[in-house]
Image (cartoon, grey):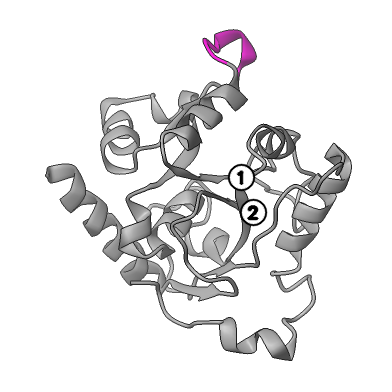
Amino acid sequence: MISNLLASSFSGAIRALTGARALWRCSPSSDHRVYYGNHVSHGDFVMIWSALPPALRRQVRPVAGADYWQRDALRRYLIREVFNGVLIERDPAQRKQDAIETLCDAVDGGNSLILFPEGTRNQGDEPLLPFKSGLYHLAHCRPELEFVPVWIDNLARVMPKGKVLPLPLLCTATFGETLRLRADEDKQAFLDRARNALLALSEHGSAPAAGNAANISHGAAE
């Protein structure tokens, strides 16, 4: 299919243009997962999606803002036919279905998700904005889900705001250890734990323990 060819082309182009590599501290798995990352550019979900092994990529759906991706015919085609995205209306007044119900429907359909719990692109000096509550509500509704923190490094510099062509800088997606909602864990505790797990993968967090070094694989996942 044309959409499958375009998907492979996009993935190859992203790796070629950014020198992208994936570092895995957990094992790639077909289990139902939510890959959640830091949000600095419109290219973030493409970077995570491209870093996944092809067999997993086909069942992982990025969660994206409907207002951005429905602006023109090209964006609508890409998000629906190439990336198979889950579109969420960011304006509650425009929603025909609850956002968490939409995500649960996608998971119940056999898919994993890519989402960004900061809720908006981080254009400030803080390495990571506070998390919105949606990550917790999804975990509460589907406690079997594994949540995988993914720190994206350098993409804001590779694709700076207002630039058409990417800059030749190495871009890395680091996939951390999985976590699940614990029994009786409240919303703030879960959000803090999930945020800290993501931040720990960055240059602002702690380095990986020596015992975990063997679990880090270099090179874009194929």
Q: Magenta stretch? A: 90-97
Look at the image and tell me whether residue 220 can be seen.
yes
Q: Which residue is the site of mark 1?
A: 116
Q: CA distance from mark 1 to mark 2?
A: 6 Å
What residue do we see at 75% from left, 81% from top?
207
Q: Are marks 1 and 2 in contact (CB under 8 Å)?
A: yes
Q: Residue at x 86, y 41 (%)?
A: 184
Number of numbered discs on residues? 2
The quarter of the image holding the N terminus is top left
Q: Residues within 10 Å of mark 2 (few under 14, many from 20)?
A: many
Q: Which three-letter amino acid code belongs to the residue tagged 2?
A: Asn
Identify whether 97 is placed above or below 117: above
Dominant secondary structure of the residues highlighted in magenta in the image: loop
| Magenta stretch: includes residue 95 | yes
Regarding residue 165, the answer to whether it shows in the image is: no
Q: Which residue is mark 2?
A: 38
Instruction: State the image coordinates of residue 75 (x, y, percent, origin top left).
Output: 33, 33
Kindly state the secondary structure of the residue where label 1 is placed: loop
- Locate residue 35, reporting x and y percent: 56, 52
